[in-house]
Amino acid sequence: KIYFHDTMLLCHLLQSTPEDLAKSQPQRFGHVLENFVLSELTKANHTNGDNVDISFYRTNDGREIDFVLERQHKLVAVEVKNAENITDKDLAGIKELQQATGKDFLCGIVICNTPRVIAYDKDIYLLPFNALWQ
């Protein structure tokens, strides 16, 4: 996967603004949001000196998790969705990783258009995008 550290540069290269993408190309806007979240995670990791490894997860059958944060063999799965209504299908990759890693799995987080933090399932939470700054 290729990401830009500067999300606005990405939008410039796409010849659009985030607002226009959100209205006219929601799937592409979702990719821009994913890029933005990685940028914020990377900055926080560097600023806080957390030494967290950031990778992604993909199974042979195509299930994905946007980001897997790992420190001292403990895992946090992070999925980014440009949606407010999250379904079990959206969580398939997270649940698969949760089952495969057992006690090393700390939690799954879906960053989405939810208005508030929601405990969705066992150790899986929905967070609004503004939680990145809190």
Image (tube, rainbow, N blue to C red):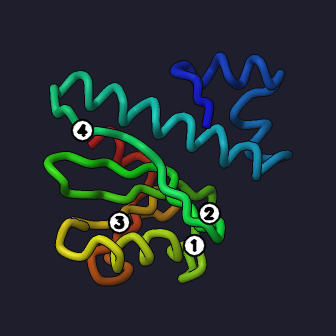
**From mark 3 to mark 4, how far is it between C-alphas?**
16 Å
Residue depth check, mark 1 versus mark 4: number of the one nearer the observer: 4
Disc 1 residue type (three-letter) = Asp
Q: Earlier in the sequence, mark 2 or mark 4?
A: 4
Q: From this viewpoint, is residue 112 visible?
A: no
Name the image quarter holding residue 15: top right
Residue depth check, mark 3 versus mark 2: number of the one nearer the observer: 3
Mark 2, residue position: 83
Report the disc number at residue 52: 4
Mark 3, residue position: 108
Q: Earlier in the sequence, mark 2 or mark 1?
A: 2
Q: Earlier in the sequence, mark 3 or mark 4?
A: 4
Q: Earlier in the sequence, mark 3 or mark 1?
A: 1
Within 10 Å of disc 1 (Cα), the crowding (few <14, some 14-19, many 20+) is: some
Q: Nearer the viewer, residue 131 or 61?
A: 61
Disc 2 residue type (three-letter) = Ala
Q: Earlier in the sequence, mark 3 or mark 2?
A: 2
Discs 3, 1 touching: Cβ within 8 Å: no
Discs 2, 1 touching: Cβ within 8 Å: yes
Disc 4 residue type (three-letter) = Val
Mark 1, residue position: 90
Within 10 Å of disc 4 (Cα), the crowding (few <14, some 14-19, many 20+) is: some
